[in-house]
Image (tube, rainbow, N blue to C red):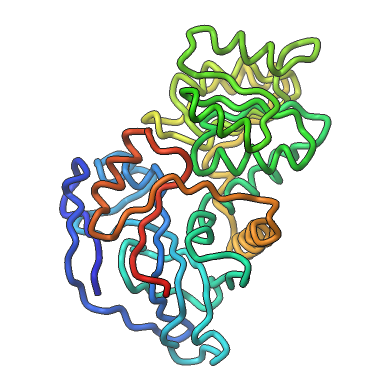
Amino acid sequence: MRAAQVTRFGDPSVLVTTDLPDPVPAPGEVLIDVAYADTIFVETQIRSGWGGDYFPVTPPYVPGGGVSGVVSALGPDVPEEWLGRRVTSFVTGAYADRAVAAASALTPVPDALDLLDAAALVHDGVTSTGLLELTAAAETDRVLILGASGGMGTLLVQLAHARGARVVGVARGEAKLALVRDLGADAVVDATSPDWPALARHALGGPDGAADVVLDGVGGQLGATAFPLTANGGRFSAHGAPSGGFAALDPTEAKRRDITLFGIGDVQFTPTDLSRLTAQAFGEAAAGRLRAVVGEVFSLEEAGEAHAAIEGRGSVGKVVLKVRSTA
């Protein structure tokens, strides 16, 4: 099979396309002919050598954890009904034209949803749907979303808006802010503005200018600066680290103000929840109520360029790898 492999930790040039042995499905597994591979920011960080405490991998390895495609072969004990089905799954080594997955981990892709959008929802659809459930965002809440123009942020904006919350999106630059507005944000704030916290307070409104829910997909200083914008009794999710680290928050101050803190560990879902949340996101997308924003599509041979685009932060929405033709 063809695969993009990280040959050593380093810059995007360490991603090299190579031939590897075809995987063989074991009992209870299927072989997927991969159409698209999802990409997420943390994969670029792992490739650079960051995050060994969280993600212990050793080069050479094939990155990526989510695919969409068609089941082309069955391992022993797998029902015949899976053969030929359009599916998504979490896998080990998604940047390849074939992948094996447990049949129990497969999610059928609805006929009304194409495989490109399905791939874009594999990780971010699950996490965004789970985050709104975890933080119990409701129509009476004011929700502040950091990184609102990214793959997950664009979904969070739509999902929070659909719940009736007042949504304020934080992003960088007019093009990204325009997209966030178009997706349903009630107000947008440019993170490059030195007085963005004051602008966010004004946009959030209410007597205290604070957010009942803060969804931090950026981390670092931006996340730390957003923490004081959380209302007493509110919820703060520090699940993102594309800035180079998760937001450093003071648990003592959070306790004093009765703020519930969530972190990356809170969005590590059980297999049952993964299946449920994936199906829920696919259902919303198939019905036209949730739009996966795909900014750029690269070929498997361009995996290094895809990582460079992600790191450059110029892309809006998701970056996805097209691995093989879906015709």
List x then y, in percent, for residue 126. 59, 53
Image point 52% across, 46% down: which residue? 293
Left or right: 68 in relation to 189: left
Q: In the shown orientation, is residue 167 left or right of residue 319?
A: right
Rendered residue at 53%/44% (across/down): 265
Q: Nearer the viewer, residue 56 or 93?
A: 93
In this view, 144 is above or below 267: above
The residue positioned 57% from the left and 19% from the top of the image is 189
Quadrant into which the C terminus falls: bottom left
Whole-percent x and y of residue 187?
66, 23
Q: Nearer the viewer, residue 40 or 289?
A: 289
Q: How many marks?
A: 0
* Quarter-of-image position of residue 41: top left
Q: Position of residue 299 (x, y in %)?
A: 30, 58
Q: Where 245 falls versus 264 (above or below)? A: above
Give the residue displayed 54% in from the left and 92% down from the top: 80
Residue 245 vs residue 319, the one in the foreground: 319
Instruction: Work out whether 158 lies above or below 33.
Output: above
User: The N terminus lies in which quarter of the figure?
Assistant: bottom left
| Above or below, comparing residue 13 to residue 1 in the picture | above
Please name whichever residue, 75 or 96, is drawn nearer the observer in this view of the structure. 96
In which image quadrant can residue 234 be found? top right
User: Which residue is situated farthest in the right direction here?
Assistant: 140
293 horizontally vs 323: left or right: right
